[in-house]
Image (spheres, grey):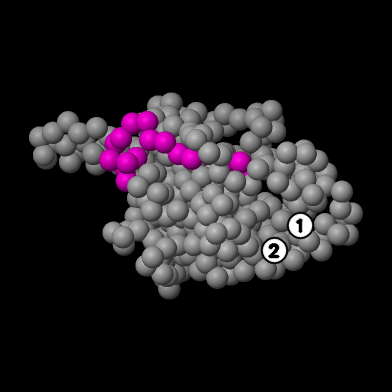
């Protein structure tokens, strides 16, 4: 463990971090991994045991401590206020494994003895509809800060943190590449809410993009995680995923990307590289990676998707 004085983080390698698991049992099976892993990610039960179980133990301790703080505050105020959801933010690049990280954490936290209700949403649900993006000439900026309805996301988080029940979330379809009109997911009083997305740790650059109250999305988080990898590796993972989707999901005639289904492997390679360089890679460099050190915990991955280092911010 590297506890460098000049760094705000404590650094752990895999072995050091695994030792913090203590006696936490592994609740997942190989069948569970098939259900929750990403398209081209290689997650093993060993990885779950060594990396994500200690993380779930840490998060469980943070949640319990927050609940104790609620009780202390209620005692002081002489009230019986309802506990509000504990919110965990997960940030990182396209194709780095944020969604898989979110699903693993959700599964592990749900399995703890207290059996908390854990919901998971992605900020894709708060992208502007394609019609709006086209009108604003932002279709090639999808995923950049200006492509999100930040005020709607902020209002959602305010409602959740205020203890409102049955808060609606728009539904985004990756197949249609758009928000589905008049379709919603209802978030109903979870104990823990995981919010995963590219932009969750970003701070305002242009006031009109963000909320009038000048709050940040991360102001509503109780804990934040950034999933990091070398940009060259993420680019390769993105290209590999694009190739897999060309052979699978893009074959669906209803898919927004069906026009790519008949492309050759070489054509797909060139298209994926161009899309990464002009959109996703640019967004990572300009908007996402600069937010990494705002996270409470950083997960650093190697070339093969495996987690190599964990950085925990000092209190």
Element carrying mark 2: helix
Q: CA distance from mark 2 to mark 1?
A: 8 Å
Coordinates of residue 153 in the picture (x, y in percent): 41, 49
Residue wearing tag 1: 239
Q: Range of the magenta residues?
A: 158-174
Q: Is residue 33 above or below residue 265?
A: above
Left or right: 147, with 272 as reference point: left
**Quarter of the image where one finds residue 30:** top right
Residue wearing tag 2: 276
Residue drawn at x 46%, y 42% is 194
Coordinates of residue 46 in the picture (x, y in percent): 66, 40
Residue drawn at x 45%, y 49% is 89
Residue drawn at x 86%, y 59% is 267
Residue drawn at x 53%, y 39% is 181
Left or right: 150, with 52 as reference point: left
Which of these two is toward me, 300 or 24? 300
């Amino acid at each position: 463990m590297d506890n460098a004085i000049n760094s705000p983080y404590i650094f752990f390698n895999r072995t050091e971090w695994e030792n913090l698991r203590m006696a936490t049992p592994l609740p997942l099976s190989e069948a569970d991994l098939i259900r929750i892993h990403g398209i081209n990610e290689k997650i093993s039960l060993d990885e779950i045991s060594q990396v994500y179980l200690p993380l779930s133990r840490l998060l469980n301790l943070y949640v319990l401590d927050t609940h104790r703080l609620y009780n202390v505050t209620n005692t002081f105020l002489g009230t019986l206020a309802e506990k509000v959801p504990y919110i965990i933010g997960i940030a990182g690049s396209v194709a780095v494994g944020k969604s898989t990280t979110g699903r693993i954490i959700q599964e592990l936290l749900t399995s703890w003895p207290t059996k908390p209700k854990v919901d998971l949403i992605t900020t894709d649900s708060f992208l502007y509809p394609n019609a709006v993006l086209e009108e604003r000439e932002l279709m090639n900026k999808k995923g950049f800060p200006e492509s999100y309805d930040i005020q709607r996301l902020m209002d959602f988080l305010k409602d959740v943190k205020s203890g409102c029940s049955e808060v609606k979330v728009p539904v985004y379809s990756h197949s249609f590449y758009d928000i589905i009109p008049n379709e919603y997911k209802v978030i109903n009083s979870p104990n823990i809410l995981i919010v995963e997305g590219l932009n969750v740790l970003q701070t305002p650059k242009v006031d009109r993009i963000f909320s009038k109250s000048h709050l940040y999305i991360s102001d509503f988080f109780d804990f934040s995680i950034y999933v990091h990898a070398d940009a060259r590796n993420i680019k390769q993972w993105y290209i590999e995923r694009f190739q897999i989707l060309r052979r699978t999901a893009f074959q669906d005639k209803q898919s927004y990307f069906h026009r790519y289904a008949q492309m050759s492997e070489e054509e797909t390679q060139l298209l994926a590289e161009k899309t990464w360089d002009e959109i996703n890679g640019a967004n990572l460099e300009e908007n996402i990676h600069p937010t990494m050190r705002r996270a409470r915990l950083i997960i650093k991955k190697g070339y093969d998707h495996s987690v190599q280092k964990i950085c925990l911010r000092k209190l």
